[in-house]
Amino acid sequence: MGQLRSADIHDPAAVESSVVEWAAEVLEEPATAEDNFLDLGGHSLLAIELNHRVNAAFGVELDLQILFEKSIGEAAADVLATINSQTKNG
């Protein structure tokens, strides 16, 4: 699993890259930000594993509804929005 520096958690490209990389790892398939997790063979148990990685790295939960209904990149954007929201409110 890729290591992020604390400064990277506010960098959209770093967050997206990490989420896409972890999605590819749990799916054991190549993935891009434009791909849909379910279309690549993802399912709830793999989503839980991906969520665990996101939570361990960023301290936020992955919105599984977005992950299932939209692209991996959109799920990553939601992670970034949650990080930024917590930073402002924290």
Image (cartoon, rainbow, N blue to C red):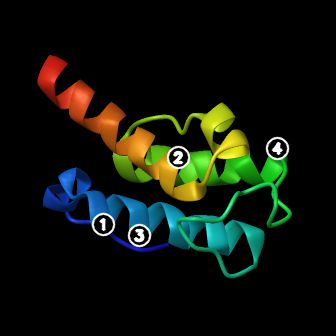
The residue pinned by badge 4 equals 44
The kind of residue tagged 3 is Ser
The kind of residue tagged 4 is Ser
The kind of residue tagged 1 is Ala
Which picture quadrant has residue 32?
Answer: bottom right
Q: Earlier in the sequence, mark 2 or mark 4?
A: 4
Helix, strand or loop status at disc 4: helix
Q: Earlier in the sequence, mark 4 or mark 3?
A: 3
Asked if residue 47 can be seen in this view, the reply is yes
Q: Position of residue 54 (x, y in %)?
A: 49, 50
Asked if residue 90 can be seen in this view, the reply is no
Q: Are marks 1 and 3 in contact (CB under 8 Å)?
A: yes
Q: Residue at x 70, y 58 (%)?
A: 36
Q: Position of residue 3 (x, y in %)?
A: 34, 71
The residue pinned by badge 1 equals 14
Q: Quadrant of the C terminus?
A: top left
Above or below for 23 versus 68: below
Q: CA distance from mark 1 to mark 4?
A: 25 Å
Q: Residue at x 77, y 54 (%)?
A: 46
Above or below for 21 versus 88: below
The residue pinned by badge 2 equals 75
The residue pinned by badge 3 equals 17
